[in-house]
Amino acid sequence: MKITEFGNPILREKARPLSSGEIKSPKTQKLIENMREFLTSKKLGVGLAAPQVGESITLAIVSIRPLKHRKDVKEFDLTIINPEIVEAFGRKGQQWEGCISAGPTKSGLFAEVPRYKKIKLKYTDENGILKNKVFEGLLAHIIQHEVDHLNGVLFVDRVKDKKTFVTYREYLKIVKQKKLSMN
C-alpha cells in the first residue's frame, strides 16, 4: 500500500461518498482489509483515510494499539464510511498529532492541534449499517483528524501555535518527558 504524501492534490480534495452497493462491494471490502492490515502491521499511526492511499472516497480506518510511548490505551478498531460530525461538545483541547502523509515515520511532523474532546458521529460501518455514536478523548480526536482528511483538510491547517511543530524524534522526547514529570 502506497501512502499519498503532503503536496499530492488528492489530499486537498473533498472525497466522494460511497453508495450502499459500493460499501458492500468486494473492491471496497478489500480496501478496508488492506488499510486495516497496513495500520496494524506497520504501526505507523492510529488512523488512515482513503485519500491517504490514493482513493478519493469517504472511508477511514481507526486502529489503536498500545505502543512504547502509548502503553495505556486499549486496542480499538473502527471503520467509518460517509462520516458526519453532527455535534461537538464543550471546548476544544490540545493534543499532539502527526500524520502518516507528512513524511516517513522517523522524519514525520507533529504539532499540538485543538480538537473537541467529545463528538457525536453519524457514519456507516463496513457492513453498510448506519450508526450514530458519541466518541470521547483520543477516539474523538482521531476521528476528527480522519474526517478532516475526507474533506481535504490537513492537521497542519488546524495548528494554532506554529511553535509546536516538531519532528517525530522530538515528539518522542516530549512524550517521554511528560510521562516522567507525571510520575
Image: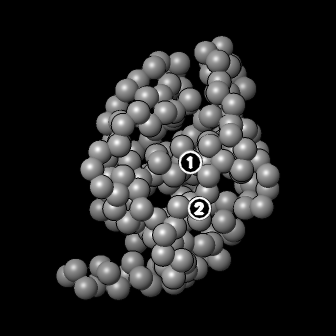
Q: Residue at x 66, y 65 (%)?
A: 102
Would you say residue 64 is visible in this rendering? yes
- Residue farthest toward the left in the current orientation of the protein: 183
Q: Is residue 179 above or below residue 158?
A: below
Q: In the shown orientation, is residue 144 left or right of residue 2?
A: left
One can see residue 137 in this view: no
Location of mark 1 (residue):
148
Label 1 and label 2: CA atoms lie apart by 10 Å
- Which type of secondary structure does the marked residue at label 2 adopt? helix
Q: Are marks 1 and 2 in contact (CB under 8 Å)?
A: yes
Height in image: 183 above or below 136?
Answer: below
**Residue at point 46% right, 46% down?**
143
Could you tell me which residue is drawn at 41 percent across and 24 percent down?
131
| Place of residue 54 in the rendered image (x, y in percent of width and height, measured from the top left) | 76, 45
Name the image quarter holding residue 14.
top right
Q: Position of residue 175 (x, y in %)?
A: 39, 78
Residue type, numbered disc 2: Asp
Q: Quadrant of residue 101?
A: bottom right
Q: Nearer the viewer, mark 1 or mark 2?
A: 2
Residue 20 numbered mark, or none: none
Report which residue position mark 2 lands on.
Answer: 157
Q: Which of the marked residues, 1 or 2, is nearer the chain's N terminus? A: 1
